[in-house]
Amino acid sequence: MTKDVMLWLARTLLAVRLGRLVEAQALYSNTTNPNPVNLTDAYSPPYYPSPWMDGTGPGWAEAYQKAQAFVSQLTLLEKVNLTTGVGWEGEACVGNVGAIPRLGFPSLCMQDSPLGVRFADYVSAFTAGGTIAASWDRGEFYRRGYQMGVEHNGKGVDVQLGPVVGPLGRNPKGGRNWEGFSPDPVLSGIAIAETVRGIQDAGVIACTKHYILNEQEHFRSPGAFGDFGQVDAISSNVDDKTLHELYLWPFADAVRAGTGSIMCSYNKINNSQACQNSYLQNYILKGELGFQGFIMSDWDAQHGGVASTLAGLDMTMPGDTDFDSGLSFWGPNLTISVINGTLPEWRLDDAATRIMAAYYYVGRDRHAVPTNFNSWSKDTYGYQHAFAQTGYGIINQHVDVRAEHYASIRIAAAKSTVLLKNNGVLPLTGREKFTAIFGNDATESEYGPNGCADRGCDNGTLAMGWGSGTSDFPYLVTPLEAIKSELVSKGGMAQSVTDNWAYSQIAALAKQASVSIVFVNADSGEGYITVDGNAGDRNNLTLWQDGEALVKNVSAYSNNTIVVIHSVGPVLIDSFYDSPNISAILWAGLPGQESGNAIADVLYGRVNPGGKLPFTIGRDESEYGPDLIYEPTNGHGSSQDNFDEGVFIDYRAFDKNNVTPIYEFGFGLSYTTFAYSNLNIVKIPAGPYTATTGKTLAAPVLGNYSTDPADYQWPSNLTYVSHYIYPYLNSTDLKEASNDPEYGAEVEWPKGATDGSPQPRIAAGGGLGGNPQLWDVLFSVTATITNNGTVPGDEVAQLYISLGGPNEPVVALRNFERLSIQPGQSATFTADITRRDVSNWDTVTQNWVITDHKKTVHVGSSSRTLLLSATLDL
Ligand SMILES: *[C@@H]1O[C@H](CO)[C@@H](O)[C@H](O)[C@H]1NC(C)=O
Ligand SMILES: *[C@@H]1O[C@H](CO)[C@@H](O)[C@H](O)[C@H]1NC(C)=O
Ligand SMILES: *[C@@H]1O[C@H](CO)[C@@H](O)[C@H](O)[C@H]1NC(C)=O
Ligand SMILES: *[C@@H]1O[C@H](CO)[C@@H](O)[C@H](O)[C@H]1NC(C)=O
Ligand SMILES: *[C@@H]1O[C@H](CO)[C@@H](O)[C@H](O)[C@H]1NC(C)=O
Ligand SMILES: *[C@@H]1O[C@H](CO)[C@@H](O)[C@H](O)[C@H]1NC(C)=O
Ligand SMILES: *[C@@H]1O[C@H](CO)[C@@H](O)[C@H](O)[C@H]1NC(C)=O
Ligand SMILES: *[C@@H]1O[C@H](CO)[C@@H](O)[C@H](O)[C@H]1NC(C)=O
Ligand SMILES: *[C@@H]1O[C@H](CO)[C@@H](O)[C@H](O)[C@H]1NC(C)=O
Ligand SMILES: CC(=O)N[C@H]1CO[C@H](CO)[C@@H](O)[C@@H]1O
């Protein structure tokens, strides 16, 4: 053992002990103004007890009743089974909890991903979250969610592990930003709410993730990092106002939309591990936001037993302490913690009730089909329990769940394509004399579309990032295929060079072409895979595969060069975007399986582009604010990542610092043009905002249990699956059964943690997503949008508000509507402004307030093209 490792070990052991002590010491603090703006030594205050669900919100009351009736029948062991995963690769899905055979209740199946069914065949590869966001189309958000839900349901999945609003996208290099929607909380909030509704209307529980401030891949969880050795998880340190106004905002929308589940993240927040952060789980999520569903851990993001249970965790995934350790913080330990009196039964009852309520809320009692695929093998026959290599039989029925989803995916991808520049060459007619196509991003990888595990390489056209947020492509229509078939049918000339470094061939072809279409990309993904030196997070914002050189090499010879960018987010285009030889630029994001068809639809004018950038394209990465942390800043301890920039990310940072971007947030061109007129604002009478008061009911206790360890021993007739996590005890000596050297150590658990008596309700709470009066409509806004061109087109009209005051964003998006308008016709843009839209978070009163500062509303075609403005009469 090196000295460093010994030091680290000593510190870790100390930290584990201290972790418990700190929780105990925190007894006497309170939650008033929890996070000062000075983030040095950031600290997350304790909040106990964990709120028990109460059936608040549309649809939840009935689900709650059914769940209580179900849980009331369960034994303690059965309740533990419902909350604890069976271990990594123990069952068919990426996560499964134990079954309840006595009631014929099968094991619940949790499956990635936010863009389709991962690890399965005969499924669709949908447009990625960060790309569909560019459609700014509520209908597309919902339809995509619904179709993904249908596919998960058809494969026998109970919980789809998505959608994503954490990362939100604080820094454009964050590896998993593309899984989520946008760094703007309102665009993200609307997108996640529609996606949650879509998934759950299909009868599958949505798992909104990752809660919260999981903004980078490096050091997201404790582990060994090459030369750095063991490093603790990063701590995202945030103040209360930024939490509420930025990062929490879309989670509130997901809760309001009824998300059945939320996944806690790998990182720490204000130095407290997310899955046992009582402030964020108990106070904020289950308290203030009134979340009714269950909190599930990210895979191995649980780092303590009783501590996480009291801090509000309801389900541990995949159930083992480390993948396939055969040990668990819950399972037997959870059983023991109830019978030794440490954990009150109501807390376990609440966890089980929340899981079952989500199940009934989405109607899984009516929809569920048995799981008919296996994540760990595509073979028809194999082992049901992959890690244990037992349970041989049929494991894959190869059920085709794709229906006609391909058609919607093509439309969605085309509607999400953003036209950034067009000097008049687009749309193409298909009768161009000689079309040249360039770039390895135009063609299929030589390994095939699924050739690299979890898409962990950047070969061929990019239509998805890498990591767990992926699904297998059923096929991938490449740009080259689609463009060629377009032209060949019309007798055109179409040739390609797809080797980015074949300089002489590139030059020769570019010289002949009447139009050159260049495909370039930039990739990123989840941190467990490194691609071209990028450990999940991008190392830079430049194009990959020498894309910039390719664009220059083509445009040096071709004065009609169209650039198509497939990327996970912003890329640097400063060196070529304004060259006269670059006649058009399109951002096509990560389109999914119909990539080529969708871009051809836009290039050849079948779809008039109406997408708008869901992020800002600047000139330099420093314009986006603080960098990611690529090297530990605290030795082997927690790197301290202070979110000092507050709410000023993406366009809010550019606006604040008066930096003109190349293409701003909300920007996107069309083949037609639009005029804005007639801004009209009607004040709607709404009562005053009142704080929620009063107390909750007492925690319900469902059933009773014996405290005799003999009643919880292994059944003699059980067919044991090796390394599987069960709820049973292997000894009547609880210390021995716990297998924990620290078992019974004197720990003073936080005050109130076990208190099931009625609790004060939270002023800013009271309904799903927060105080229901936050959604009172205060103004109704209309404006006239006119298509004054010659072709039909879509315009996304955007409503921004200036909240006034010295420390507020210049403008903040609050609403939008995508309108389809015929040439010469007008449409009416309609948007409500709610109380929430004009409020700021007040850290002193711990509530939302409307400040005295003058508030202005703007309606326009981007965050910097604010064509109509008026003052709000508040
Ligand atoms: C809460 O803590 C603050 C700051 O430590 C203190 O000023 C205040 O008196 C405390 N409030 C209560 C109700 O204990
Ligand atoms: C923030 O707090 C730390 C320690 O509590 C202190 O050393 C530092 O001076 C403070 N910074 C500011 C800007 O107040
Ligand atoms: C717990 O789940 C396991 C795995 O599904 C199952 O074998 C066992 O019978 C269950 N135990 C109880 C008490 O239901
Ligand atoms: C119980 O949890 C402790 C950690 O708190 C762990 O060391 C032990 O192995 C667990 N026991 C079992 C049986 O999984
Ligand atoms: C940025 O990263 C990409 C992908 O690893 C790489 O191809 C490119 O060369 C890098 N750019 C710079 C300027 O280092
Ligand atoms: C490119 O150059 C040719 C020949 O000079 C000219 O006819 C054509 O209009 C130019 N195209 C564009 C898009 O500038
Ligand atoms: C095991 O034995 C118990 C008690 O006799 C019985 O209820 C249960 O059905 C048996 N389970 C199996 C898997 O045979
Ligand atoms: C109980 O289980 C633990 C962990 O699985 C193991 O280490 C221990 O030896 C077992 N004890 C008995 C008595 O079987
Ligand atoms: C109760 O059980 C839990 C889980 O094994 C253990 O962590 C804790 O130390 C035990 N408490 C007491 C007082 O024995
Ligand atoms: C031709 C090509 O780009 N091949 C790459 C495919 O991906 C692997 C893994 O990243 C690279 O090593 C190859 O160079």
Image (cartoon, rainbow, N blue to C red):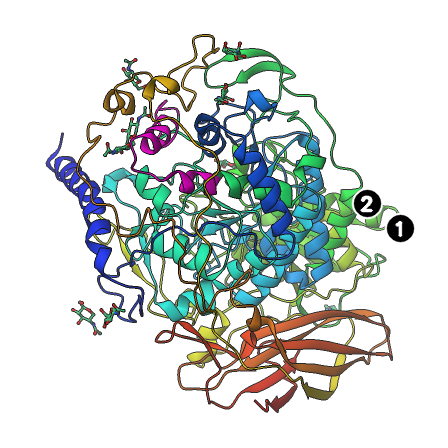
Q: Mark 1 points at which residue?
A: 490
Dot 2 crowding, Cα within 10 Å, few <14, some 14–19, many 20+: some
192 or 645: nearer the viewer? 192
Instruction: Tell me the tag on residue 266.
Output: none
Type of the residue with mark 2: Ser
From the viewer's perspective, tell me whether residue 854 is left or right of residue 413.
Answer: left
Q: Does the magenta run of residues contain 339? A: yes
423 or 187: nearer the viewer? 187
Looking at the rendered structure, the secondary structure element under dot 1 is: loop
Q: Where is residue 463 in the image (x, y as percent from the top left)?
A: 62, 46
Q: Residue furthest left?
A: 3
Q: Quadrant of residue 270?
A: bottom left
Q: Where is residue 517 in the image (x, y as percent from the top left)?
A: 69, 56
25 or 809: nearer the viewer? 25
Q: Is mark 1 within 8 Å of ligand 6?
A: no
Magenta residues (range): 324-351
Type of the residue with mark 1: Lys
Q: How far apart are marks 2 and 1 (CA)?
A: 9 Å
Viewer can see residue 588: no
Q: Where is residue 193 in the image (x, y as percent from the top left)?
A: 62, 58
Q: Residue at x 70, y 62 (%)?
A: 137
Q: Does the residue labelled 2 lie within 8 Å of ligand 10?
A: no
Q: Is residue 868 above or below residue 496?
A: below
Q: Name the residue under label 2.
A: 485
Q: Quadrant of the N terminus?
A: top left
